[in-house]
Image: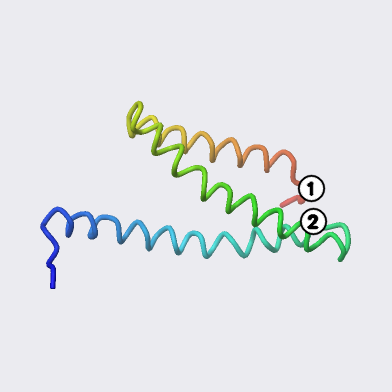
Amino acid sequence: MTTATSSEAASISTMLPAIIVWGIGNSMVTPGLSAFAADIAKDVGTRSQTLSLSRMAADSAFLCCPISLGLLAQVSSCSTALYTTAGLIFGANMIFAFRTTEQSF
């Protein structure tokens, strides 16, 4: 049986809360996005296409973003990668806010 070294234990103890927060956040966001995608479908025939496209976009982001932001952090710095992430999320939210057809007021 192999025991974890102190650096491995520190890595696990710092990553576990982040993974838990990510999991909780993802479980709160995904149903709302799926419901919104179903709501904006014009009819029942396009609902499945709308849901699959929204899921495909999310899966593509989960696949491409960690790799590209990790490479950016290696080339420049972690701060640059974090600011780039914040900028991409802000930009995506602004595009969504201006293009959505739903009104909250």
Query: Which of the numbered marks, if any, corresponds to residue 83?
Result: none
Q: Secondary structure at mark 1?
A: loop
Query: Which of the numbered marks, if any, corresponds to residue 40?
Result: 2
Type of residue at label 2? Ile
Query: Which of the numbered marks, if any, corresponds to residue 101?
Result: 1
Question: What scheme was used to colour the molecule?
Answer: rainbow
Q: Please tell me whether mark 2 or mark 1 is closer to you in this view.
A: 2
Count of numbered marks: 2
Residue at the front extreme, as displayed: 1
Q: Residue at x 76, y 62 (%)?
A: 38
Residue 17 spot, x, y in % from top left: 31, 60
Report which quarter residue 72 is drawn in: top left
Above or below 64: residue 46: below
Report which quarter residue 80 is drawn in: top left
Q: In which quadrant will I find the N terminus?
A: bottom left
Taking depth in this image into account, of 4 and 25 the one nearest to the observer is 4
